[in-house]
Amino acid sequence: MTKQGVVPDSFSEPFWDAANEERLVIQNCRDCDRLQHPPAEACRECGAGDSLEWKPVSGRGTIYNYGVVHDCPVRLLQKDQPFNLAVITLDDDPGIQMFSHLPGTPVDDVPVGAAVEVIFEPTANGQLVPEWRVIAD
Amino acid sequence: MNTPTAPDAMYRNDEGLGLWEHRGKVAAVGVGHAPTARRWDGRPETCVGAISIQALRQAIDDAGVAPEQIDGLVVVPVTTTGAFWEEGKPLPMDVIESFQQTDDPLDGVAKLSAEWLLANMPELTNVKFTMYGPGCMSNALNVAAQAVGDGLTHTCLVVKSWHNFEGRYYQSGANAEEALPGTAAMTRLWGGPASYGTALQFAEYCRKYGKTHEMMAPFMENSRRNGLMFPEGYWAQHRPEELGREDYLAARWIAKPANLFDNDIPIMMSGAYLFSTAERAADMKQKPVYILNHASSNARPRSLTPTLDEVEAETARTARKIYEGAGITADDLSFENMYDGFSLFHQFHLEGLGYRGIKFGEALDFYQTDISIEGPNPVSPSGGNVGSGRSRVWMHTDCIQQLQGRAGPRQVTGVTPEVAVSGGPMPLGGNFTVWSASPD
């Protein structure tokens, strides 16, 4: 399924540039050694704005939870309804979540707790976006 | 007059604050509601500004005060969460020109300012205090209670209104575009509907505690039943249909496990209240309902969406704040009236409160018992948004009316209405008011 395109802005550009290189980076506070996602202008723990960096992560995670979207507000995705929409937690820090459509996983047959790995898929304008795929046993 | 948004100091966000300093010294007296509609029909007399005036005048009349006695006005300026005036759509000039205008042509049509209300309610000649309580009536009530307690106003109106236009919620704007800005795209590319986050929490709840979506059916039936006894509500006014178990469970999914009825129906509505000091309220037309405390939750999840652990920690913390400031315990609650839009998070509020001693994971079992207004454990006697449409107001009106003994056919009969709490919206992020039939 093809997601809306992405027009990177100055704040998000490092994340999207990394995605185009098939690397996953997450915002990190050097002072706290703490990841945060979604990213923000300042660390949500210490409040510092000048200690934030984009840190490469392993691209391994776990399916934490999921729902099945039957009535999507995004026009471009409506033709693909119903679809899985899962929450992935990163192995690097299980407190950090990312969304996923779980490509390759049947609708409403989602193995919660299963291991996943990041892949990168093109959006409508060619920008690559991180997605997640169940790792085969 | 330039109306400010309420500062953080107006809210009681922290634990350990002790009893609210104005406990029992502020009262709600008057209630006003405009007729509801599914959508705006384009006429001046039904625009969101006009129905707000209607509700406010009804609250004034209900309290039996002269308009010139009113010196305060607290307004929720946003009148939708998902029905926006599309960019480039021609302005409804016939409507706009029917009213005194502000600098914003959509004021009174797609939003609401205190200035617009005062310009169009010339009878309010003595309002010297105005403030915005953003988001919900729950927020505005906290602001008004604190303002009256602090002496910023002695007789204060509070209003929250909703507009709803043609077309579907959330389906215009960025959601209709071919591309998103990069920062928004990091969270929005996946297309979750508004109820998706709540659906996730409910799914996690069911997995952890061994519950099912089917177990929601008694709550939904009970809420619609109560809503049909709420003459101010949408379903009672326009579609007096019961919601049976089979109807509920057969509804189409929106974000499974949230179905159509788990999502409240957007409507046009306005609700208003008149608050005053306990001393002044004693001479008004209706029995005063005293405010024992207000409390707020402003927690944020660690990442994209709250986990069940985060939800349970915050609802428990909110309850501690509610009880501490009011000087009550869960045992003092006559009934339960927390927010329900979306229905699948109502049990989080209920469990956080520890209503009737229930613990985390027990609310859906509790729903299988007698939760009716006739029983000893009323749940959502207002019927909430499930029973009367999207307003985030019904539970407050119901608490006031129940404690005044004028909830009509909705009046609880299995308990004596003495103390209640209402509020929301979200388990992480909301505002709550404790009401009492007596000031102490």
Image: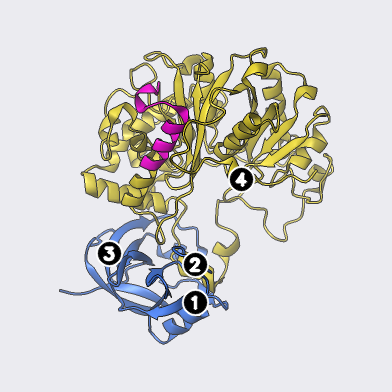
Chain colours: A blue, B yellow
Q: Residues within 10 Å of mark 1 (few under 14, many from 20)?
A: some
From the viewer's perspective, is residue B46 above or below residue B25?
below
Distance from Cα at disc 1 to Cα at disc 3: 25 Å
At numbered mark 1, what does the secondary structure look like: helix, strand or loop? loop
Q: Which structural element holds mark 4?
A: loop
Q: Which residue is drawn at 50% across and 65% down?
A: A47
Determine the chain carrying the residue at label 3. A
Name the residue furthest left: A137
- Which three-letter amino acid code belongs to the residue tagged 2? Leu
> Do pointers 2 and 4 mark residues of a single chain?
no
Q: Residue A124 — which label?
A: 1
Q: Are the two marked residues, 2 and 4, in contact with CB atoms closer than 8 angstroms?
A: no
Marks 1 & 3 on one chain:
yes
Asked if labels 2 and 1 touch by Cβ distance under 8 angstroms, the answer is: yes
Q: Name the residue under label 2.
A: A76
Residue tagged 3: A63
Say which label, 3 or 2, has the lower sequence index. 3
Give, as a single range, the part of the protein colored magenta: B316-334
Name the image quarter holding the N terminus of chain B.
Answer: top right
CA gap between label 2 and label 4 equals 32 Å
